[in-house]
Amino acid sequence: MTKNGKPAMTGREKSELLWGWLFILPTVIGLIILNIIPIIQTIYQSFFKTGDFRKGNIFVGIENYSKVFGDAEVWQSLINTLKYAIVEVPFSIVIALVLAVLLNRKMKGRSVYRTIIFLPMVAAPAAVAMVWRWLFNSDFGLINNVFHVHVKWVSDPKIAVFAVAVIGVWSILGYNMVLFLSGLQEIPGDYYEAAQIDGATGIKSFFHITIPLLSPTIFFVLVTRVIGALQVFDLMYMVMDKSNPALDKTQSLVYLFYKYAFINKNMGYGATIVVLLLVITMIVTVFQMIGQKKWVFYN
Amino acid sequence: MDSMERNRKIVTVVIHVVLILVSITMLIPFIWMILTAFKSVTEATSVDPFVILPTVWRKDSFTAVMQNMNFLVLYKNTLLLIFFRVVCAVLTATMAGYAFGRLHFKGRDACFSLVLFQMMVPAQIFIIPQYLMISKAGMLNTIFALVFPGMVTAFGTFLLRQGYMGLPNDLEEAARLDGCNIGQTFLHIMAPLTRSSMVALGIFTAVFAFKDLMWPMIVNTDKDMLVLSSALAKMQGQYVSKFPELMAASLIACIPMIVIYVIFQKQFIEGIATSGGKL
């Protein structure tokens, strides 16, 4: 026993303490510098206005927040982001799930299909957005000329955000599918055999076996996709020019953040917008935690 | 049993038809990128008749963009960004993952909650202060600036910790009885066993470093310090209607990653699936 009454550390405990801290130190220092301090600074910054003519930061209290809540542009961008998510998330999940079920068998060409469907994941979003913008081009684009229509896919304020969401679905489909495929491989084959003996057809066993047993994976993909969709930026930035008439009805929250913080150089207002994003993400996470208890089936 | 056999064949054919249609849809943007890149501007913007295949396969757009953009420099910067991010991520996560997953010591759980916290927060919230740090240090337009936010990885630490937690206890015990200290056990026994997690993390980090757009655009604006994605973004603003040149540049930017992916597709898909699935 040591003087203060605690049992003395054994040699093993001492060495675990020493090595443990040695191993985590780079990561912990990195996280503090790169993440913990920045998050505090961002929240701090959201109470300041970046001064003109290098006057430095001016404390404005909650002015940024009251401005954000009254700012139609911010609310519109939030609606745009939600519109994007409402298309991108369900479509990318349902299509990917069907494809994963179709591919989850021994068949010719399985790895070729998988490789092709996953391909957009390794392409730079900047390039992806550029080629889609070209496909969507209202005068010379492939889509309008093949279907003989004249739709302004990315410059009509009513539909541009959905057109961008289509690019989002196309880009993320393969990723979701691969996650579902690895989830499917963990479902034991006997479940399906038993169902077949009981006379269940493919579609019945899809709804009664696949969906319930895959629900942890589906839930996980849903959570990550919703959070990812709320942060959409690359596609918006590349597809929507500053002069695009649909910009107001399409730009996402993170696009607006980028615009305020790094183009208009009003970092305080940018910080406020990104704090709003943080709050929304947290709310979504809490809702999903509650929802999880209701319908996820853990074995 | 003939009818069942026939049914199964019909199902197989239907599945193939669906998958082929989906595959074509996935490939059309890439094919259109290639076809447009080899056309002249007149051909690309011809509507009546609408031209699918280039009548002559021209390389003019490629030579033009290669004259205007220094792709060697862009490749080099992108490669350095990927290289340093992968090395930093794998190195720090392998060490921290071991300590979080296999050792018991005071302060461990508090520190691990930092890791979990970072993973729950949207990454954009860190960007303004990270930018100000780089800017105040006079490090804008450097390779270090590109690598900076990815020097450590909460996600990778979490992934590697999972990897270590899946390993059996007896190996570690045996090493300890043989007189190895914790450092030696880690280096010679445990770390090599998580090689598959390391590869998964490396591929994941590389792909997302390659795809990153906002950060490189913010910190590196000098022509010689751009990466492929930020250079494409900058180019789009300048080449408004030169579609073949835009497509040629996109193609040059994407080809290396696609070729590597096709060669190592199994490792890529498994790496991203295992790391993505554990996020």
Image (cartoon, coloured by chain):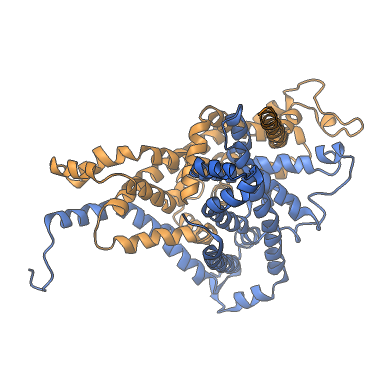
Chain colours: A blue, B orange
Residue A239 seen in render: yes
What residue appears at the point 54 percent right and 40 percent down from the top-left corner?
A193
Rendered image quadrant of residue B167? top left
What residue appears at the point 61 percent right and 74 percent down from the top-left corner?
A64
Residue located farthest toward the right when viewing the structure as drawn: B48
In this rendering, position of residue A49 left or right of residue A28: right
Q: In the figure, A292 relative to B85: above or below? A: below
Q: In the figure, B62 relative to A1: above or below? A: above
Residue B76 placed where, x, y %?
Answer: 51, 34
Q: In the figure, B192 relative to A221: above or below? A: above
**Number of marks present in the image shown:** 0
In this rendering, position of residue A65 left or right of residue B191: right
Residue located farthest toward the top when viewing the structure as drawn: B56
Residue B173 placed where, x, y %?
Answer: 19, 45
Residue B62 placed where, x, y %?
Answer: 69, 27
Q: In the figure, B39 relative to B142: above or below? A: above
Dividing the image into 4 quarters, which one contains the N terminus of chain B? Answer: top right
Residue B226 seen in render: no
* A58 or A216, nearer to the observer: A216
What residue appears at the point 43 percent right and 62 percent down from the top-left corner?
B117
Residue B264 placed where, x, y %?
Answer: 50, 30
What residue appears at the point 11 percent right and 74 percent down from the top-left corner?
A4
In this rendering, position of residue A272 left or right of residue A235: left
In this rendering, position of residue B93 left or right of residue A225: left
* B144 or A277, nearer to the observer: A277
